[in-house]
Image (spheres, coloured by chain):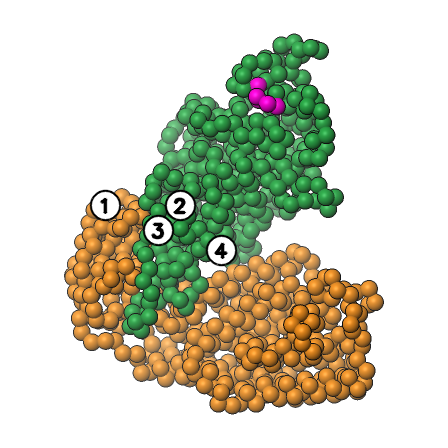
Chain colours: A green, B orange
C-alpha cells in the first residue's frame, strides 16, 4: 500500500477563533508591563523536552494506534453543534490539531498556558497537567458516519460525497443493549497516556476548545490496558482475569498492519489513505456471575488456560491454537469458545489491532460492579469488524457480557506539520 | 411594560456612546511607522531592527523553517513574556502587535515549539512612557456612569414592584402574588451580583430554604414567600432531594406573612439606599470597566450554576424567568464595554463577534420556552434534551465571554 498520507492543503493549524482564546493573555501581559504588575513565568515546562515519552501528532499514520499501549484512556465522542458551519468545523479541527500537537509534546495548550497569561483572564490551559511529563500521551481523532450525513440524510458540511462507502452505523448484533448516551458521535477523541491525569487533561481542554462548535456526547475512562502492541510488553489481563490480546498485531509487523489496519490508496477514499477505522464497544461484564463459574468452565468459555494464557490445545501463551486437537472429552478447544470464534483462522484470516481498556464506572443500582471492557479495535474496513463480531456474537462468552455502547469512526492519516487532521477532506 | 421601555431607553443612550467610541479609539492605528520584520528558521531569528520607539509595535514574523514556530518578546529578565505570537506554520506569516514601554527586552524564536528557542537578541525600546489616552479615560467613565444608571433604574423599579407584590401576599391574594413573583424577581436578577457583593443582603432577600438551614440563618425573602404561595405536597422533597418539604416548616400565618413581607420591603429599601449612595459609586469607579465586564460574566455564571439546574425556584418552577433576567443583565453590562473590546484590535473584534453570536443563539434557544413578557413554561416541563441544549448554548457564550475583561483592559 502507499505510505503517502492523503494530499493536504497546508494551512495554519490554528483558526482565528482559537487564536483568541489562547493568545489574549499574552497581549494583556504586554499591557501589564506598563503597570509593572506582571509576574515572572517560566518559558517552557522544564520536563517538556524529555523526548523519551513524547509522540508526534504530525507524520504519516496517526499516533495512538500502533503506539505501545499506554496505561490509561479517556475516550470522548462529540457532536457538532446545531447551526455550526463547515468553516466552524474546519476551525475546530485546526484548533484541536494544534492543541493536540502541543499536548503530545508535553506542552500546555498554548504558549501562555495555565499561569503565563494575564491575571485578568481565565488561563488558556486548565493546569492540572502542570509539572507532569508528556506520559506518552497520544490523541487520535476520528470522523463518525453522522459527520458526513445525519441519520435523516442531511449533508450539513458538504462532505457526503466524500464519505467512505463502508462507513455507516454498525448493524445490530446479538447481545447488543445499546444506550444512546454511549453510542455514536460525529467526532471522537481517543486520548491515551501513562498518567490518567494527562489523558483527562487532554480531553478536558479539547472539550473546552470545542464549546460552541461541538458538544460532548459521551465519554469513557479506561485503565489497565487489555492489549499490547509490542513484543516487549507482557500480555495484560481483562476483568475476567484472562490474558487479553495475545494474538494482537504488533507495531513492528508492518506487513500485517498494511493488510489488516491501514486503509490503502486503492481502498479509498483518498483522504483516508494511511488512516484506519476505529470501532469502540463498551462491553459490560456480568462480573458477579462470572466469578461464580468454575475454573474449568471459565477456561472452556475462553478457550485458553487462565494462568498461562495458553490455548487449551496445548503449548505456551503464544502457541497457535489447534482447533482440531482432541481433549479429555471431544475437542480440546470448544468450537464455541471465544478464542475459536474470534480467531483469524475461523474468520477468513481477518485480524484487527486491539487496544482496549478495563473500565469500572462505580456500581449498578443492584449493587453490582458497573464494569467491563472498553473495546477499541482498528480495522482496514468496517466489514472486517462486522464479520468477526457476528462470529463472536454467539460464542460462549456472550452469556457473560452485554454491549451497552458502540461507535465507528474513520481515522484520517496524521496531518503534515502545520496542517490539521482531516485537511484532505476540505481541500 | 415599564421595565422594557426604560431599559430600552438606556440601551439607546449606550448606543449613542458607542458612536463616540468607534470614532476615536483605534489603538491598532497608533503604531508609528512600518512593521519590524522577523524571519524564523531552524537556527536563527533575524530581526530587521534591534530597537524601536515606545508605543504599539508590530512584529511581522515569517517562518522560513520547516517546523511550526513561535516568536517572543521577553522582558529584561529574559523570562517574562511581554508578547508572543504562536503557531506560525512553515511558510506562513503572523504579526505580533504589542504595546511597549521604554526599556530593555529580548526577542527570540522557538521553532518546534519546545526548548529555549533560537536567536535570542537584545531589543531596546526608546522614547517616553506611553500615557493612557485622555479620551479613552473619559469614555470609560461614561460606561461606568451608564452602568450605575442601569443598576439604579432596576432597583428603582424593584422597590414599587415589591410593595405591590407584598401587598397581594399579605392580603392573601395568592393568585395575583403568584403572577407577580417571577416578574418582580427579574429586576433583582438583572443586577444580582451588585446585591451579592453586599454581604448579608442577598442571603436575606434570595436564599433558598436549604441554604438558610445550612448556614443557620433565619429563612426570609422571596423564596420563603414562594413556598407559601406554592404549597408543596405532603410527600414533596426540598431542593436537596432528601429533606421533606414539610420538615420544620408550615405555611405562614397571616401575621407571619405580614412580617416576611415587611422584611422583604425593608431589605429591598436597603438595596435601594445602597445603590443611590456614594459607597456604590465608589466601588463601581474603583473597578472601572473591568467591574462591568466581570458583572456580565458573573451573571452568566449564575445561569450556568443555579438556573440551568432548576434549583433556584424549587416550588414555583419559574427558573426560566430568572434565567432570562440574568442573561438580559449580562448582555446590558456587555453592551457597555463592547466597544472597548472592539477597539483593542482584530482579536477584540473577533471576540465581540463570538459573544454577539453567543447571546443571539442563547436568546433564540430560550425563546422557544417563552419570554419575560408573555411568560415561560415551568422548569419541570423541560426535558433532559431541553436543558442540555440550553447548557450547550451557555457554554458557547460563557467561554468567549470569560475573555472579555482581559480584552477591554487592553
Q: Residues within 10 Å of mark 4 (few under 14, many from 20)?
A: some
Q: Are marks 1 and 3 in contact (CB under 8 Å)?
A: no
How many numbered markers are drawn?
Answer: 4
Q: Which residues are magenta?
A: A306-310
The label on residue A348 is none
Q: Are marks 2 and 1 on the same chain?
A: no
Q: Residue at x 62, y 67 (%)?
A: B306
Q: Is residue B57 left or right of residue A414?
A: left
Occupied quadrant, residue B78: bottom left
The chain carrying label 2 is: A
> Residue at label 1?
B42
> Residue at label 4?
A208
Q: State how far apart marks 2 and 3 are (Cα).
A: 9 Å
Q: Position of residue A416 (x, y in %)?
A: 35, 41
Label 2 residue SS? loop
Q: State how far apart marks 1 and 4 are (Cα).
A: 32 Å
> Residue at label 3?
A45
Q: Are marks 2 and 4 in contact (CB under 8 Å)?
A: no
> Residue at label 2?
A133
Q: State how far apart marks 1 and 3 are (Cα).
A: 21 Å
Say which of marks 4 and 3 sits in front. 3
Amino acid at each position: 500500500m502507499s505510505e503517502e498520507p492523503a494530499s493536504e492543503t497546508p494551512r495554519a493549524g490554528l483558526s482565528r477563533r482559537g487564536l483568541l482564546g489562547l493568545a489574549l493573555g499574552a497581549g494583556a501581559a504586554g499591557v501589564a508591563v506598563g503597570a509593572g504588575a506582571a509576574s515572572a513565568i517560566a518559558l517552557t515546562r522544564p520536563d517538556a523536552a524529555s523526548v523519551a515519552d513524547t509522540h508526534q501528532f504530525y507524520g504519516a499514520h496517526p499516533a495512538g494506534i500502533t503506539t505501545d499501549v499506554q496505561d490509561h484512556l479517556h475516550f470522548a465522542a462529540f457532536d457538532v453543534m446545531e447551526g455550526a458551519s463547515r468553516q466552524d468545523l474546519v476551525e475546530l479541527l485546526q484548533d484541536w490539531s494544534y492543541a493536540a500537537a502541543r499536548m503530545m509534546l508535553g506542552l500546555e495548550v498554548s504558549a501562555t498556558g495555565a499561569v503565563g497569561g494575564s491575571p485578568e483572564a481565565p488561563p488558556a490551559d486548565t493546569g492540572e497537567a502542570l509539572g507532569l511529563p508528556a506520559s506518552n500521551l497520544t490523541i487520535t481523532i476520528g470522523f463518525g458516519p453522522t459527520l458526513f450525513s445525519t441519520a435523516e440524510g442531511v449533508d450539513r458540511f458538504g462532505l457526503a460525497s466524500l464519505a467512505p462507502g463502508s462507513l455507516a452505523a454498525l448493524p445490530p448484533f446479538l447481545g447488543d443493549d445499546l444506550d444512546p448516551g454511549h453510542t455514536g458521535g460525529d467526532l471522537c477523541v481517543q486520548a491515551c497516556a501513562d498518567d490518567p491525569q494527562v489523558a483527562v487533561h487532554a480531553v478536558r481542554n479539547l472539550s473546552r476548545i470545542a464549546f460552541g462548535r461541538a458538544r460532548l456526547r459521551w465519554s469513557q475512562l479506561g485503565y489497565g490496558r487489555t492489549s499490547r502492541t509490542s513484543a516487549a510488553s507482557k500480555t495484560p489481563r481483562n476483568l475476567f482475569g484472562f490474558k487479553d490480546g495475545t494474538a494482537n498485531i504488533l507495531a513492528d509487523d508492518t506487513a500485517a498492519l498494511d493488510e489488516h489496519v491501514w486503509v490503502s490508496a486503492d481502498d479509498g477514499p483518498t483522504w483516508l489513505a494511511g488512516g484506519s477505522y476505529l470501532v469502540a464497544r463498551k462491553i459490560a461484564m456480568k462480573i458477579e456471575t462470572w466469578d461464580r463459574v468454575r475454573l474449568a468452565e471459565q477456561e472452556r468459555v475462553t478457550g485458553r488456560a487462565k494462568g498461562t494464557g495458553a490455548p487449551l490445545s496445548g503449548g505456551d501463551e503464544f502457541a497457535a491454537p489447534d482447533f482440531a486437537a482432541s481433549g479429555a472429552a471431544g475437542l480440546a478447544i470448544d468450537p464455541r469458545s471465544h478464542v475459536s470464534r474470534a480467531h483469524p483462522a475461523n474468520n477468513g484470516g481477518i485480524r484487527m489491532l486491539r487496544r482496549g481498556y478495563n473500565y469500572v464506572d462505580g456500581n449498578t443500582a443492584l449493587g453490582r460492579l458497573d464494569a467491563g471492557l472498553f473495546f477499541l479495535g482498528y480495522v482496514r474496513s468496517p466489514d472486517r469488524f462486522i464479520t468477526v463480531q457476528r462470529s463472536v456474537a454467539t460464542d460462549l462468552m456472550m452469556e457473560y457480557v452485554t454491549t451497552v455502547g458502540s461507535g465507528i469512526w474513520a481515522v484520517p492519516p496524521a496531518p503534515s506539520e502545520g496542517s490539521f487532521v482531516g485537511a484532505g477532506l476540505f481541500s | 411594560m415599564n421595565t422594557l421601555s426604560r431599559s430600552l431607553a438606556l440601551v439607546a443612550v449606550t448606543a449613542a456612546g458607542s458612536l463616540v467610541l468607534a470614532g476615536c479609539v483605534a489603538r491598532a492605528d497608533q503604531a508609528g511607522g512600518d512593521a519590524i520584520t522577523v524571519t524564523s528558521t531552524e537556527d536563527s531569528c533575524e530581526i530587521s531592527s534591534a530597537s524601536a520607539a515606545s508605543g504599539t509595535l508590530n512584529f511581522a514574523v515569517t517562518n522560513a523553517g520547516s517546523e511550526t514556530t513561535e516568536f517572543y518578546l521577553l522582558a529584561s529578565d529574559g523570562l517574562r513574556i511581554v508578547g508572543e505570537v504562536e503557531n506560525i506554520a512553515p511558510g506562513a506569516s503572523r504579526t505580533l502587535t504589542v504595546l511597549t514601554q521604554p526599556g530593555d527586552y529580548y526577542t527570540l524564536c522557538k521553532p518546534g515549539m519546545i526548548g529555549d528557542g533560537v536567536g535570542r537578541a537584545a531589543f531596546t525600546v526608546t522614547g517616553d512612557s506611553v500615557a493612557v489616552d485622555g479620551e479613552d479615560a473619559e469614555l470609560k467613565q461614561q460606561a461606568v456612569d451608564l452602568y450605575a444608571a442601569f443598576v439604579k433604574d432596576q432597583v428603582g423599579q424593584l422597590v414599587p414592584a415589591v410593595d405591590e407584590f407584598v401587598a397581594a401576599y399579605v392580603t392573601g391574594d395568592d393568585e395575583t402574588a403568584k403572577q407577580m413573583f417571577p416578574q418582580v424577581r427579574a429586576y433583582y436578577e438583572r443586577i444580582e451580583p451588585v446585591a451579592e457583593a453586599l454581604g448579608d443582603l442577598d442571603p436575606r432577600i434570595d436564599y433558598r430554604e436549604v441554604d438558610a438551614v445550612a448556614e443557620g440563618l433565619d429563612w426570609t425573602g422571596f423564596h420563603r414567600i414562594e413556598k407559601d404561595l406554592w404549597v408543596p405536597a405532603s410527600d414533596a422533597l426540598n431542593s436537596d432531594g432528601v429533606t421533606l418539604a414539610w420538615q420544620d416548616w408550615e405555611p405562614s400565618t397571616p401575621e407571619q406573612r405580614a412580617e416576611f413581607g415587611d422584611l422583604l420591603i425593608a431589605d429591598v429599601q436597603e438595596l435601594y439606599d445602597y445603590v443611590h449612595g456614594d459607597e456604590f459609586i465608589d466601588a463601581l469607579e474603583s473597578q472601572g470597566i473591568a467591574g462591568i465586564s466581570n458583572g456580565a460574566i458573573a451573571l452568566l455564571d449564575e445561569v450556568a450554576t443555579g438556573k440551568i439546574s432548576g434549583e433556584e425556584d424549587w416550588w414555583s418552577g419559574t427558573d426560566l424567568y430568572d434565567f432570562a433576567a440574568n442573561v438580559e443583565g449580562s448582555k446590558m453590562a456587555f453592551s457597555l464595554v463592547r466597544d472597548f473590546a472592539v477597539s483593542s484590535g482584530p482579536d477584540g473584534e473577533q471576540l465581540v463577534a463570538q459573544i454577539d453570536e453567543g447571546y443571539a443563539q442563547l436568546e433564540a434557544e430560550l425563546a422557544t420556552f417563552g419570554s419575560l413578557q408573555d411568560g415561560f413554561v415551568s422548569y419541570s416541563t423541560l426535558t433532559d434534551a431541553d436543558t442540555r441544549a440550553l447548557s450547550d448554548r451557555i457554554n458557547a457564550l460563557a467561554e468567549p465571554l470569560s475573555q472579555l475583561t482581559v480584552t477591554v483592559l487592553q
